[in-house]
Structure formats: C-alpha cells, structure tokens
Amino acid sequence: MAGYMTSAVVSAHLDALATANPTVCTRSGPGDWAAGTAGGKSGYVKISATTSFSPSPRWAVLLIGGVHARELAPPDALVSFLEKLLPAYAAKSAITYPAWTDPVSGTVYGSFTIPWPWVKSVVERLDLYVAPLVNDDGRDWVLATLPSGSSPAVQELHKMWRKNRRPAPAGVTSPWGIGVDINRNFDIVWNFPKYYNTALSDLDIGSSKDPRDETYVGDITAGSPESEPEAKNVANLMRTKNISFFIDFHMFSRDILFSWGLETNQDTDATMNFANPAWDGKRDGTHHAAYNEYIPTGTAAAAAAMAKRISDEILAKAGGADPTAQARSKYTVMQSASLYITSGATDDYCFSRWFTAATAGTPVSPVMAFTIEVGGDPGKGADQNEGGFSPNYVTQYPKLEREIHVAAWAFLSAVSSTAFVGPQAPPAPAPPPPSTSGGSGCRSMFLIALVGVTSLIASLLGVAAVGIAALWAAALGVVAVENVLGRRAAGGRAAGGRAAGGRAAGGRGAAGGRAAGGRAAGGRAAGGRAAGGRAAGGRAAVGGSAPGALWARRRA
C-alpha cells in the first residue's frame, strides 16, 4: 500500500536518526540483530542520555512493532514517534500534536501536547530500545508490488500474510506453508501439546503445529523455540539489556492486554506455573478451572493500573472532546488470556524472565509486559472499521498513529517517574488471613516483598508516599489489606468469577462469549469464530475474498 515503509525505508530512517542525534541515539550494530531468511534487517535504536537528572541504575524499556507482517501501522508509527521525540529533546521543547479531521466522516480529533518534562524524563531517565519492525521479510512480502490483474488468491497471499518467510518444511507444497509465526516462537510453553490437554474439544489455544496455519509455532518435533532469527533478535535484546518494561504493538481490536496470555491468572497457588512439569498435559485453557497460572497479587494489580493509564491517556489526548472521536478512542483493558490462550508470545516470554531468572539463581528486576491491539475491529461494524490490518494511509492511519504515540508516551512517562527496583524474586502467594484483626510477622514479610511493585502502582495512580495498607486499598479498590490478601485484583477472579477484564460471576456473557471486558457477540462463536475471525477450519471473510475484506481475526 502506498505510503507504508518497507524494511529498507525503516532502516534508512533509523540510520538518519542516529546520525542526526549521535549523543542520545545509538544504532544497533551488525552483531546485534540477525537478518531474516530473506535478508531483511532493520534493527533497532537505543535512546538514552546521562545528565545530573539521570538515575543510576535506570529502567530498560523495549517497544516493538511489525511482528506480524500484515499489521501495517505500528512500524511507521514507532518511527514517527522517534522522529518527534528526538528533535523535541534537542530543542528542549514540548510536542504539540495538531487536531486531525477524518476526511471521510468529518470527525475531529483534537490537538494535544506532550509536556517537555515527559520528553526530558524519557531520554534522561530510561534506556529506551525501539525496534519498529521485527518481521522485515514478512512486511516486504506484504508491501510487494503485484502485477496488474493478479488474482484475488494471489492478492490475499500477499496482503494477508502474517508469518515470516522461512521456506516451507519438506513435503509442504501449499504457499501458505511458508513461514513461522514469530509471536508463537518464544521460549514460553512453546511446545504447546506438551503443556496443554489437547484432547479437550474446547481448548481455546491460538497456536498450531501445522505449517500451513498462520499461527504455526515452528517444528515442535525436531526444532526448538527461537528457531526464527526474528524471535531470537527480540529475546536476545530482552536478555542482554535486562528489559523490565515492554510493549508489543499489534493490530487490531482496541485492546490493552497484560500477562498472562497462556492461562487464566490466579494468585494463591505458586505450584501452578508454566515451569512445573507436574502440570504438563493438564493445562486446560480458560474454559476450565483445574489449572490457572500463578501471578503475584500486586503484579496483576500493577499491570492493570498501567494498562488503564494508557487507555485513559489515549481517550483523553487522542480522543479529544468530540463525542464520536471519544467513542472511537476507547481501549479495553484485559488479561491477554481473556481473548484466547497463546503459547510462545513476546509479552509472556518477557514477563516469564522474572520467574525463570529467580529460579536459576540470577534474579532480575520486576518485569511488566503488554500487547496493545491498535485500531477497531471491522467485524464489529462500520464505527470500528479503521482498515483492519491495512488502514488507508491518508484516511485511517493518522488516527492510529496518534493512538500509538499516546500509548508510548503514557507508558514511558509512568516508567520514567518510577523509582528503580533492583533484582528480586517474584513474591510468594499471600498467607491465609489470620483469625484476628491483628497483623502477623508472616504477612508483614509478604507486604515488604511487594514494596517494589507497590511503588510502581503508586506512581501510576499518582499516590504520594503513604502506608502500604492504604495504598493497596486505593490501588485495588478494597477497604483493607486483609481484603486484598483474600481476593484477586483486576484481571483475576473475584467471588467465583472474574473481576473487571475477565469473566463475570458465574461464567460467560451474551452469545456464548464473555461479559463486559471479555468476549461478547462479535468474539468467538461456539466451536469457531464470529464475523471477523475464522470459521470452522478455514478463513472467514467480510464481503468476499478481496484484500482488505478478509479479517483473519487473530490476536498478536
């Protein structure tokens, strides 16, 4: 599509930024980022300056886009984000985004300003790594100029491509058998048949061992996680730079997703974890409750608070004052698994490092990871149709670009204002509430272990230095710490169901889906997917098979 950057253009823009800003922008080197099998290699930049304002040590943050080839907006938007950040820092100025008027509907999205202190803090208080385009080869395939008169099948093969361009396995002749889904190739429950009870007919896992499927994880028989250079590039960056905060920008559905994506969250049984082989073959997805993934209480609360901050800022800044603009700028906060469970995803792998590093005796600082699904879901009607995976560069992309920028600013400004927390193991589950109102030494130790996560929640909520009990009450919307230790935070379960962002009390919402914050009509139908997703065994279409009408509805 005219306007969107190929991998070579993305790389050239990053080169230019590093050349123009040599003291604060560092380009990835030849050994830092491996080329894809077709040769694409745009790499990343590091943004960082050290002044008297800079903490030591400081948080390392990673933003990525373009993991899935057909999702066109995030790479361009991340490049343009950098092209606003660096000149503003050099000029010591705020950044004003002018109002934008939708040329089709006439809806006005108001102007907004990013204050100079945010700009300064991002550059001087963080080590910010940005890899705008992870899947270079796949994107170039999508953007390739096709011969005039190409058949709808050929157009679909290009425009709807999701994976990288690894050659198909021996014996696979379908053109769809090329490639591996990079966002199923990371080292977190990668070999999913080993971890899950795949005999369950309603196991809601969005991963496949069939090379012809768009969620193909790679060769689980003879291969390994990070078999793809694109996945290894990102994973190596996470490990070598000790990334603590992470966003992977995808398309589409206006969702802000936090871990876990591999199962429903719970905070009471630490033995239910992805690394425990006793649960292999028994994990059962979100339709069952025998297994749920452990996440510390405060960690889920902090992630939900951060995601809400991002959602609120998108609505307030990118949405502006116009009611229609606001309605089209509302992002839903939820646990990733509320869509469907995934294996080998970027966000879960990043988050999992906090747990695996502690187990290995080399703890790292707390980790927080998100996936943001940018843009509306065309399957939900005209008001949500923002081009799906391929927004028009003139009439639709500018709105999404603003939302990606605001999400990045909201995230980075929150992290830069958060005091650094050194390496530590994730907190253990809370002990049972005592029989009396008095505190216990055991509970006190548990609360002390959560101080790092609590400081993050404090910064997100704008809370000053207050007692930890009062802070938890404010953060989780409960009356006292005793209540916090006995129930799950937003995104987990409450009173037998799920709290905001998950399942409502008693199970599922309308049309066989989930209630508010989860699935509803327009999500999955019984045994398959609704309009905008996949029908049983194949691809669903909205209006036919032409490019731009096929919405193979897969989350990140």
Image (cartoon, helix red, strand yellow):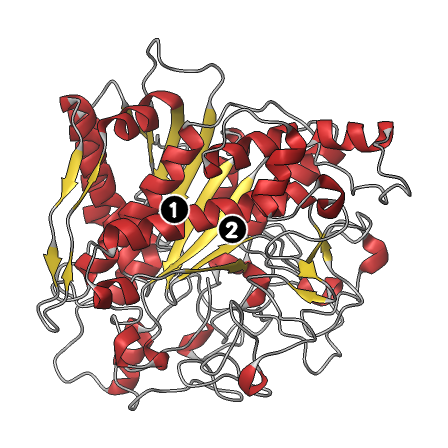
In the depicted structure, whether residue 423 falls above or below residue 137: above
The mark tally for this picture is: 2
* x 40%, y 26%: residue: 127
Image quadrant where residue 445 sits? top right
Q: Is residue 38 above or below residue 242?
A: below
Q: Quadrant of residue 45?
A: top left
Q: Position of residue 134 (x, y in %)?
A: 38, 49
Alpha-carbon neighbours of circle 2 within 10 Å: few (<14), some, or many (≥20)?
Answer: many
Q: Return the residue found at the far top.
A: 52
Q: Is label 2 in a helix, a strand or a loop?
A: helix
> 473 or 12, which lies in front?
473
Disc number for residue 160: none
* 150 or 344: nearer the viewer: 344
Residue that appears at 25% across and 70% down: 386
Whether the residues at callouts 2 and 1 have beta carbons within 8 Å, the answer is yes
Q: Three-letter amino acid code at disc 1?
A: Ile
Q: Dot 1 surroundings within 10 Å: few (below 14), some, or many (20 or more)?
A: many
| Label at residue 64 | 1
The amino acid on which the numbered mark 2 sits, given as a three-letter code, is: Thr
Q: Which mark is residue 346?
A: 2
Asked which secondary structure carries label 1, the reply is strand
Image quadrant where one finds the N terminus: bottom left
Residue 424 position, x and y percent, is 67, 27
In the displayed structure, 428 sits above or below 513; it is above
Q: Position of residue 416 (x, y in %)?
A: 41, 28
Q: Can residue 94 be seen in this snapshot?
A: yes
- CA separation, marks 2 and 1? 10 Å
